[in-house]
């Protein structure tokens, strides 16, 4: 027996109401903020992710599903959405549109991650990108949209964690300070952090190992190393958040696992028994478009893990709108009735109904089948009905039945 590959899930019919609820809530909120949907290919040039997400990140080093196709091209199943949306922005000339361009997506992502609850190898994100405006008011908008979806979904209390990791130009001074601080502790760091110390010092702040925790509190803070532009931008954003009373927690250890971020970074974390896994995360990436060969262009966005959101909705027993009732069912007995049943199914569908022809079994078994589909009404064609050119219509909830002329259901009848 084959099984679904490790880290993947089947989204069964009974799971669909949650998916519809999350996607439609997101789409509605995104539209109300002026975002328009974009869909990009499932795979892209491997180089796109290497360049933007970063050679030294876990995603590029360990988690990409890359393959060489028959044309000898190295392709990768997208591990995230931002790089692809920025590629499309440039390739499709969106830099020539009035800026900023607001784009939204709902898409599957692929990462060779260690599967566990809320962590999968194929997972789905909803996300947005606002490209072409560096104004702090856009940071505010993106944060409001991220929080707006979470609120509209009815998710319980969450915390928004916020930091500013500065511009690319501010980075060397800050990284030097970070390395100088950690230099005193290198012998006590975990193996991964000893590597990070050289390869990607920013990620030292992100270490979850117990042995590295004591060094985090006193580590230099990126917000103390912001250049003039980033500092004004940061203060303006904090001003908006405070003025509008948007709760947030500043955390100098929030650095994110993708290299393209600049300035604002944030995550939304559900507030339940110490859970640390973000349901939504994002930030600014003012250097990314230029890195892809475009002119210097600001950008900011977020993505949310739909599986994680659904796990939280289910844990909190949030009611989601269930499926409307099942289809109408047409039951029959005998060859002549079957011919009539096939016609009736077609006619009812033409009138805009969802209709299913019952499988050819005893009438009793057909009624059971109709119940299993949650059919509101069953149309029965037996010998008596055939003789009278009629159909018996049974209301499943009440059990009441009435005979109606078949002609009532023929087009023009
Ligand atoms: P990310 O933090 O890698 O950011 O992913 C965003 C969200 O996707 C996470 O907070 C989490 O909810 C979900 N997620 C990530 N990995 C997994 C996984 N293996 N299984 C289930 N859910 C997962 C990005 O992807 C950026 N592109 C976000 C962004 C958009 N930044 C700017 N614009």
Image (spheres, rainbow, N blue to C red):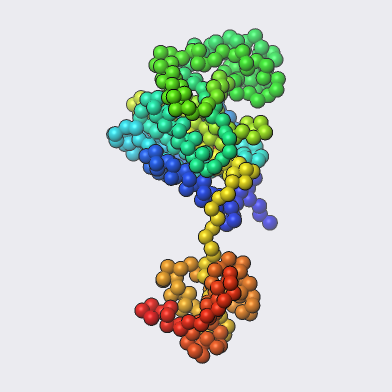
Report the residue that reaches farthest toward the bottom: 387
How many numbered marks are there?
0
Side of 126 relative to 9 (left or right): left
| Residue 354 higher or lower than 11, as above or below | below
Left or right of 338 on screen, residue 365:
right
User: Do we see residue 110 in this rendering?
Assistant: no
**Residue 51, how many percent across, how many down?**
47, 29
- One can see residue 2 in this view: yes
Q: Nearer the viewer, residue 303 or 248?
A: 248
Q: Residue at position x 63%, y 50% from top? A: 4
Q: Viewer-proximal residue, 77 or 29?
A: 29
Instruction: Give above or below for 222 relative to 79.
Output: above
Can you give x and y, in whole percent of width and height, for residue 388 in the image?
A: 49, 89
Q: Which residue: 39% across, 41% down?
A: 32
Residue at 52% x, 60% y is 324
Q: Quadrant of the N terminus?
A: bottom right
Q: Quadrant of residue 249?
A: top right
Q: Is residue 131 above or below residue 232?
A: below
Q: Nearer the viewer, residue 21 or 98?
A: 21
Image quadrant where residue 412 sits: bottom left
> Dividing the image into 4 quarters, which one contains the C terminus?
bottom left
Residue 390 pos. (x, y %): 49, 85
Determine whether, in the image, residue 92 is placed left or right of residue 396.
Answer: left
Say which residue appears at 40% left-offset and 43% top-offset. 31
């Amino acid at each position: 027996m084959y099984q679904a590959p490790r880290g993947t899930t089947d989204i069964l019919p009974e799971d669909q109401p949650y998916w519809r609820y999350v996607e439609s809530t997101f789409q509605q909120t995104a539209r109300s903020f002026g975002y328009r949907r974009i869909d990009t290919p499932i795979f892209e040039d491997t180089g796109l992710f290497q360049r933007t997400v970063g050679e030294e990140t876990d995603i590029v080093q360990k988690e990409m599903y890359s393959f060489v196709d028959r044309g000898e091209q190295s392709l990768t199943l997208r591990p995230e959405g931002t790089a692809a949306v920025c590629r499309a922005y440039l390739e499709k000339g969106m830099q020539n549109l009035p800026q900023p361009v607001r784009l939204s997506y709902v898409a599957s992502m692929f990462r060779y991650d260690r599967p566990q609850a809320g962590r999968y190898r194929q997972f789905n994100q909803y996300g947005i990108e606002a490209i072409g405006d560096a104004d702090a008011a856009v940071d505010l908008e993106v944060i409001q949209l991220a929080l707006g979806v979470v609120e509209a979904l009815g998710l319980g209390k969450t915390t928004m964690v916020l930091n500013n990791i500065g511009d690319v130009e501010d980075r060397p001074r800050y990284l030097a300070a970070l390395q100088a601080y950690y230099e005193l502790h290198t012998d006590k760091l975990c193996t991964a952090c000893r590597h990070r110390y050289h390869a990607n010092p920013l990620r030292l702040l992100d270490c979850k190992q117990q042995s590295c925790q004591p060094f985090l509190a006193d580590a230099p803070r990126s917000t103390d190393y912001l250049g003039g532009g980033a500092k004004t931008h940061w203060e303006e954003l904090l001003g908006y958040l405070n003025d509008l009373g948007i709760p947030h927690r500043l955390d100098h250890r929030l650095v994110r696992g993708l290299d393209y971020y600049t300035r604002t970074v944030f995550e939304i974390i559900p507030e339940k028994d110490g859970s640390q896994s973000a349901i939504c995360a994002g930030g600014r990436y003012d250097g990314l478009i230029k890195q892809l060969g475009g002119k210097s262009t600001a950008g900011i966005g977020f993505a949310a893990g739909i599986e994680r959101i659904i796990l939280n909705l289910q844990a909190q027993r949030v009611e989601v709108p269930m499926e409307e009732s099942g289809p109408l069912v047409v039951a029959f007995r005998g060859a002549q009735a079957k011919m009539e049943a096939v016609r009736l199914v077609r006619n009812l569908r033409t009138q805009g109904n969802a209709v299913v022809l019952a499988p050819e079994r005893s009438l009793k078994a057909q009624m059971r089948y109709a119940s299993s589909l949650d059919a509101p009404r069953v149309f029965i064609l037996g010998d008596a009905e055939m003789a009278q050119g009629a159909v018996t219509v049974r209301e499943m909830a009440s059990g009441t039945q009435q005979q109606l002329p078949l002609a009532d259901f023929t087009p023009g009848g």
